[in-house]
Image (cartoon, rainbow, N blue to C red):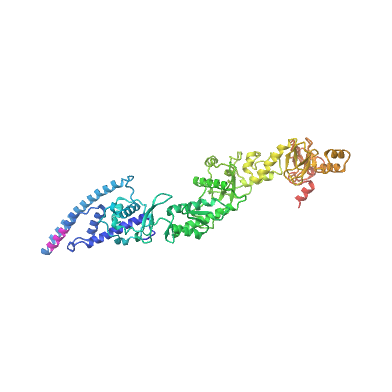
Amino acid sequence: MTLGMNAEAYLDNALRLQNQRQYTNYIEASSPSTSFESQETAQKSFSTQSSTAVRPQHSTQKLRSWAAKYHVDSKATGSLSRGKELVREVSSSIQDAQSENHGLFQEVSKLHRKLDMTIGSPLWPVTLRMILMTRITEATFGPLALDSGQSPPLSEMGYLCPIPSSALDVTLNSVQANRFGIFLQRGHKQSNIYRGLRVYPCTKCYKPRFRFITANCHPLFSKLNEYPQINGIPYGDICSPCGLKALSRGIWWGWWGNLGNFTWLKHDWDETCFNFWINSEKRLEDILDSLGYGDTNHVNDYVKNFKLAVMYRQALRNLHPRPNQRELDAAAKLHTHLIKRGYMRSFFEPSYGVYNKFEPGPVVLGSMDNGLKIPIFSRLFRRRYKPKECVVCCEEKYEISYGKPDQWGKDCAGYSGLWMWSILEYPTNSIQKCDHDFDVCRACIAQHISTSLGNVDIDRIMCPQCDKAFSYDEIRSLAEPETFQRYDKILLQRALSSEPNFRWCLSETCESGQVYDNFIAMVKCAECGFRMCFRHQQPWHTNITCTDFEDLRLHGDPNYVETQKLISKTTKGCPECGVRITKGKGCFHMTCRSCKHEFCWECLADWDSVQNNPQRHNDGCYFRSSTVYPTAISGENLQAALQRRYE
């Protein structure tokens, strides 16, 4: 027997070896006068004996008498016919004996089945642990139990290797329980056999576990210590199986927490004394060896998972901004939920790192409805087998295997948020209310929205596949977070522009604006600190009051004239409402923020009339005779736009 065999194999082989040993003793004890009885007959007789626990003594005596009779008669008569007759007679008797033994075997089998049906009773299940605990109790409290003279000397069980701890809790059938109950000696006279082996309850699982109190124990029990050891000395009140479970939990989920420290995996042997930080593979191997799981398979599996956990942890540490502990806890729960639902692979798939070097892949920050920004390992999602090609970027992308959008939404209940859709490769009708198939990937749609913010009216950002304008919620779901912040800010500024006390910042480097109190002459931009005159809506006139500035302006102050020239040069009045408009770095298709009138910046012609007919531009307009479309170039003025185009 080898130490590597499992518990069931150990029990089966132990019984087989015991039967072989008893059979050998049975043959050696047979009388030489029974030479007619062959080893085959003896084997059958022994098999019947061991399987039914009943020895058919009367059948054996008949066979011996017939064999003796045959031996004498064949010597005296030498008659061949008489010998044949005796052979037939003996054969018939053997068949009768076999039939009788078979009947006994059937009866005993019925009794075994009835015994096996007692599962659930207080005496069931019977295990090696139960038998050993009984023997230790009997050996310790000798007067409470009688010695049994039926047990073979334990020294004769040297043909068995040490009992592995994995065999302790295997349920024994009635035959196995009877056999092990016999050859494990009982009684206070056998206390020396069970020396050094005691039963202690674990403080975690409260199960009775075996523990060595001395190093000198019987070889058969040398593998039964179930408490951690350091240098061969057991310590702590937590058993090794509980310690291994705690270590597994630490490796599987401990890496989510405490990103600020490099030592993150902590193993608690004893809640009061022994706390160990595991910060290296060597330290992990030492811990496994102390738990009694230092074999190659355990060490390789745990070291591999430890390396994977370190990779995942480093990916989280590289995020900017780094998520807080509340967000990490929410992310751990979300990943656990998705793994259980089958949408994600486990963090510790056996195939990771087998063929190629494993990388955690990109980590995206997803928004939940409760405001948390949670990290998501997008590489772990299960993907569809067939890719889909985007009609814009022509890239083939494997979509997440999320089933139908409605079911995806139901399965993510309790963890809902924009992350549900931002991790997908293509939009769905849950976030984009279009009637067509979605052939443009989310990355291309996000780029389209970002580009449109500077070139078209904010209310006319269209779907790239149809003429439908995106709604606020659609842009929130489809755009990148930075793009949506710009979009939301523009909407806010446009709404505030209708307020009489709202003023735009006049700094060339600031695009902010805010509402001011109208009784304050000098106002300051909260974004950049630029100072302005609230009344005259121009940069603050230093060392002069608003009244004096008004007098100077009415009496031909040169600064006032220059200001008016600058305004006339850099702004134009809306052809519809007259509000002064500043040309930005976009195209030459303009939309008035006040009245929404659309026109050509160069000639102020109505956009609806010139959109499809360049000849409708006013006289002198560059776009009337040019093949260049007003939306094809962009710049602060026509000269800068043309120079940029032909560079």
Which portion, as a residue range, is magenta?
Answer: 64-74
Image height of 227 relative to 567, above or below? below
Which x, y percent locates residue 353? 52, 57
Which x, y percent locates residue 350? 48, 54
Query: Can you see residue 297?
Result: no
In this rendering, position of residue 56 left or right of residue 551: left
Farthest residue toward the right? 555
User: Residue at left 53%, top 52%?
Assistant: 255
Which x, y percent locates residue 599? 76, 39
Image height of 586 relative to 220, above or below? above
Query: Can you see residue 173?
Result: yes
In this rendering, position of residue 256 left or right of residue 532: left
User: Residue at left 48%, top 59%?
Assistant: 285
Query: Relative to the observer, which residue lies in front, 591 or 473?
Result: 473
Query: Relative to the observer, which residue lies in front, 463 or 146?
Result: 146
Quick check: is 71 in the magenta stretch?
yes
- Quadrant of the rendered structure where residue 95 is? bottom left
Q: How many marks?
A: 0
Our reading of the magenta stretch's main secondary structure is helix
Quadrant containing the N terminus in the rendered view: bottom left
Farthest residue toward the left? 77
